[in-house]
Structures are given as structure tokens and as C-alpha cells.
Amino acid sequence: MTDVYRALAHPVRRKILAMLRKRAHTAGELADAFDLAKPTLSGHFAVLREAGLVSVERQGTSLIYRINLSVAEEALSSLMNMLGVGAPEAPRKAASKPKGRKS
């Protein structure tokens, strides 16, 4: 899971994932969306692949990237559980009436 969090920590990788959430993209399409050198972008793709957040398929000379939503959802769920977000609250005890007073 550490690889997933490391991958999600960088804004370029988060933008790549946001683009892939809409549809699959070729490496060239993704590269056109960023003003980065190809080796830098390739490094970002590698981090995403190693974390299991994207899959890549070769079609002829093109590389097609797709998001792996199950890994992203698992990471989000794990993070939410760790932070206690969305966890059910413990039932509260009913407030007791002060002694000596009648209602």
C-alpha cells in the first residue's frame, strides 16, 4: 500500500489518474497534456504501474494506459479507515438526570 500512497503523492500522477478515469489514453495523448520531458513522464508512468494503479497494453506501436480502479478504491478505503473517516460513531450514553431534581 505504501507504493500506492507514494504514487498518489505527486500532482502529475494524480492528474494522469484523473484523465484515465474518464477513458483509456495512449502514452502520446497523456504526454501531450503535460509540459514535461518524455523521460520524466515515463518515470511517472513507471511509478503508477509499480503501484498497480494503471495497466498498460501495447497496440501496435502505441501503449494504452488504463486506470485500475480496484487498487485506487482499496487505497482510498484504507486511508479513510486509518483516519476514521466514515467510520460509524460509537453510541452515546444517554445523559443522566441530576439527582435530587424531579421532572
Image (cartoon, rainbow, N blue to C red):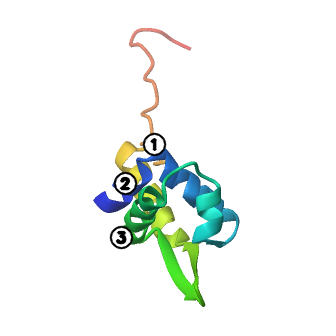
Q: In the depicted view, which residue is nearer to us: 92 or 9?
A: 9
Which amino acid does the dot numbered 3 rest on?
Glu
Which of the two discs, 2 and 1, labels the residue nearer the N terminus?
Answer: 2
User: Residue 58 appears at what percent x and percent y?
Assistant: 54, 86
Residue located at (61% from left, 68% from top): 28
Q: In the depicted view, which residue is nearer to us: 65 or 9?
A: 65
Say what secondary structure mark 1 lies in. Answer: loop
52 sits left or right of 35 in the view:
left
Residue located at (29% from left, 58% from top): 2
Say what secondary structure mark 3 lies in. Answer: helix
User: Residue 100 appears at what percent x and percent y?
Assistant: 41, 9
Q: Looking at the image, is mark 1 or mark 3 nearer the viewer?
A: 3
Which of the two discs, 2 and 3, labels the residue nearer the N terminus?
Answer: 2
Q: Is residue 95 above or below residue 90?
A: above
Q: Quadrant of residue 42?
A: bottom left
Residue located at (61% from left, 62% from top): 30
- Circle 3: is it few (<14), some (14-19), or many (20+) Cα within 10 Å? some
Disc number placed over residue 5 in the picture, else none: 2
- Whether residue 20 is visible here, answered yes or no, is no
User: Residue 27 appears at what percent x and percent y?
Assistant: 57, 70
For mark 3, what is the residue?
50
Spatial CA distance of label 2 from label 3 is 12 Å
Residue located at (61% from left, 56% from top): 18
Q: In the depicted view, which residue is nearer to us: 32 or 89?
A: 32
For mark 1, what is the residue?
89
Q: Quadrant of residue 84?
A: top left
Number of numbered discs on residues? 3
Question: Circles 2 and 3: CB distance less than 8 Å?
Answer: no
Q: Quadrant of the C terminus?
A: top right
Which amino acid does the dot numbered 1 rest on?
Glu
Disc number placed over residue 55 in the picture, else none: none
